[in-house]
């Protein structure tokens, strides 16, 4: 939350990071328009629901630094508290967006090799795979939860955590936009086809959540079920359950730069990686092509 970011990193850095993500959002949407992937995005805003004091502190910090936010009292379901709408936010279907992007890049000469297993840690000029060795002027490891495992120098910085999710069959309208609840512990949205997706309760998972194995905790899934019915008031049957592995850092800042092993690395987005990943990629690309990046300081560890 933006007020917390100002406490952690100071007002100047927090504002610069927030502004960079807004610029990145515009760049992503421009690229999506260019390649015909705009339908993968829905700019419908995002709603944070929390106790009123926390929400008002968040809004005050946003407005003080020139960003948008609107208080909302009419909350979905039986959720309690106060809402903060950030109108510039939204949702993306990441698979449709990234598959279209990859196909567009291939038409421009980029070669994509899927299902190619990397053996051992990449070095600054080579990656050994099951199909052969790839050599390049620069090697970039772009990952999230797996970053610490792939780049030993980052093993103590980025830790893998499992996050639980479920999805329902199509339901009557319940959520106009993505919702973050309980300081972001829970998150839900209703897709255009009516399905509701819900995740959260990693604190209920406790220490067991820190794992690189995509195994589900039945207690967390049961709590998601009760939240779906009792707080969101969604009665549609659950059709899918899964676990996503996400990279977290104690800062909590993403990683973007060159490691002590000479490999460029980006990842560890603390659960908020889509736009921050674009910023991190731009930083690394500029470091490789120009030797420096004006935004490199944004994600440098304090």
Image (cartoon, rainbow, N blue to C red):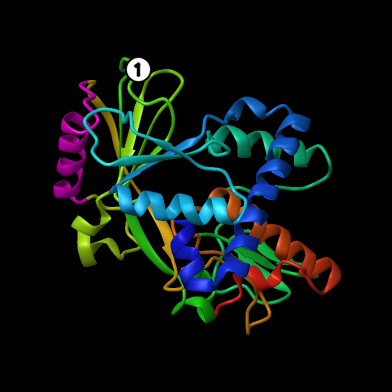
Choose top left, top right, bottom left or bottom right for residue 259: bottom right
- The quarter of the image holding the N terminus is bottom left
Q: Residues within 10 Å of mark 1 (few under 14, many from 20)?
A: some
Part of the protein shown in magenta: 217-235
**Residue 95 pos. (x, y %):** 54, 36
Q: Residue at x 53, y 81 (%)?
A: 153
In the rendered structure, the answer to whether residue 135 lies left or right of residue 120 reads right
> Is residue 183 something one can see in this rendering?
no
Q: Residue at x 50, y 57 (%)?
A: 61
Of residue 74 and residue 149, the one placed in the foreground of this image is 74
In this rendering, the answer to whether 124 lies above or below 145 is below
Q: Residue at x 31, y 47 (%)?
A: 52
Choose top left, top right, bottom left or bottom right for residue 257: bottom right
The overriding secondary structure of the stretch rendered in magenta is helix
Of residue 67 and residue 93, the one placed in the foreground of this image is 67
Of residue 252 and residue 170, the one placed in the foreground of this image is 252
Residue 256 in magenta? no
């Amino acid at each position: 939350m933006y007020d917390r970011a100002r406490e952690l990193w100071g007002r100047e850095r927090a504002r610069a990071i927030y502004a960079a993500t807004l610029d990145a959002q515009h760049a992503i949407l421009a690229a999506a328009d260019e390649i015909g992937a705009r339908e993968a995005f829905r700019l419908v805003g995002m709603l944070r629901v929390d106790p009123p004091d926390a929400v008002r502190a968040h809004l005050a910090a946003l407005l003080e630094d020139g960003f948008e936010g609107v208080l909302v009292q009419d909350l979905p379901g039986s959720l309690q508290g106060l809402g903060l709408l950030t109108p510039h936010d939204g949702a993306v279907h990441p698979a449709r967006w990234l598959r279209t992007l990859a196909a567009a890049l291939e038409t421009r000469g980029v070669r994509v090799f899927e299902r190619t297993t990397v053996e051992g840690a990449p070095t600054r000029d080579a990656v050994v795979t099951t199909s052969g060795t790839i050599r390049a002027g620069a090697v970039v490891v772009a990952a999230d939860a797996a970053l610490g495992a792939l780049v030993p120098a980052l093993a103590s910085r980025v830790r893998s955590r499992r996050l639980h999710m479920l999805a329902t069959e199509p339901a009557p309208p319940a959520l106009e936009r993505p919702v973050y609840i309980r300081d972001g512990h829970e998150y839900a949205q209703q897709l255009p086809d009516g399905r509701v997706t819900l995740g959260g309760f990693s604190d209920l998972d406790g220490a067991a959540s820190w794992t690189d194995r995509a195994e589900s905790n039945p207690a967390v899934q049961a709590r998601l079920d009760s939240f779906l019915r009792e707080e969101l008031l969604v009665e549609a049957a659950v059709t899918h359950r899964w676990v996503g592995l996400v990279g977290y850092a104690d800062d909590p800042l993403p990683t973007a730069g060159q490691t002590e092993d000479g490999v460029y690395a980006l990842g560890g987005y603390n659960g908020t990686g889509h736009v921050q990943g674009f910023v991190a990629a731009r930083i690394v690309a500029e470091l490789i092509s120009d030797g420096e990046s004006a935004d490199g300081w944004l994600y440098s560890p304090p």
